Image: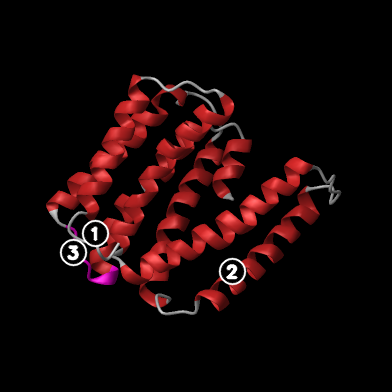
Amino acid sequence: LFRSWAISLGVPAGTTSLIVGIQPLIVAALAGLLLSEKVSAVQWAGLLLGLLGVFLVVADKLSLGEGTPFGIFLCFLALFSMAFGTLYQKKYCSDMSLKSGNFIQCIVAAIYFWIMAFFMESMVITWTGELIFALAWLILVLSLGAITLLYILLRNGAAANVSSLFFLVPPCTAVVAYLLFGETLGAFSFAGMGAVIAGVALVNIKFGKKA
């Protein structure tokens, strides 16, 4: 939500991706303090390599001087919200029921977005095939599929390992944008994808069975 709001305020998508991409580093830094997890030197190298890869992937889309201070603030708010949510989920909610957990989250999110829509939107829906497809994707693939998978990963793996998978989001987005929207992939993008894959492998290689 905060990231989408930031983009609507003129912050480039590449900039938001880079800021939010710091999340695995924050989780790794706090995992030892809050979760008693140990992050090895090799894993730290993998996290830094993953961040470098994210930077290379979005480098072509970074624009200096765009956006607003409030938009950048929202990016960092999204960053720390994701990091806190990951740590909280791992520490206190690893054994929760996936059904009830998803249900509670969806209800709370629905109430929140309804309130926001009431004050910021017209509350008029124009039903189209594209909208129905988008809603089905958001509900089935993201809200149910991806979030449930995240809960399962956090239940069985270390928080730092699971968070490193977020590095894969910008490269995957770049590939999808290339296939669906004809966006170009330059040398930096391919180098970044390789760096991200290598970084995630370094983070998870020791704990691959758990993560």
Residue 28 screen position, x and y as percent: 27, 57
Q: Which of disc 2 and disc 3 is earlier in sequence?
A: 3
Which mark is on residue 149? none
The CA span between labels 3 and 2 is: 30 Å
Count the marks. Answer: 3
The reply to whether dot 1 and dot 2 touch (C-beta < 8 Å) is no
Q: Which residues are magenta?
A: 34-39
Residue 33 screen position, x and y as percent: 25, 67
Mark 3 packing: few (<14 Cα in 10 Å), some, or many (20+)?
some
The structure residue drawn at horizontal position 41% and vertical position 30%, both measured from the top left corner, is 58
Dot 1 falls on a residue whose secondary structure is loop
The CA span between labels 3 and 1 is: 15 Å
Which one is in front in this view, the residue at disc 3 or the one at disc 1? 1
The structure residue drawn at horizontal position 43% and vertical position 76%, both measured from the top left corner, is 93
Q: Is residue 65 left or right of residue 200?
A: right
Q: Is residue 16 above or below residue 139?
A: above
Q: Is residue 91 left or right of residue 42?
A: right
Which mark is on residue 105? 2
Q: Which of disc 1 and disc 3 is earlier in sequence?
A: 3
The reply to whether dot 3 and dot 2 touch (C-beta < 8 Å) is no
Which mark is on residue 38? 3
> Image quadrant for the C terminus?
bottom left
Q: Is residue 17 above or below residue 104?
A: above
Look at label 3 and name its amino acid. Lys
Which is more toward the observer, 127 or 77?
127
Look at label 2 and name its amino acid. Gln
Name the residue beneath numbered marker 1.
208
Q: Which of disc 2 and disc 1 is earlier in sequence?
A: 2
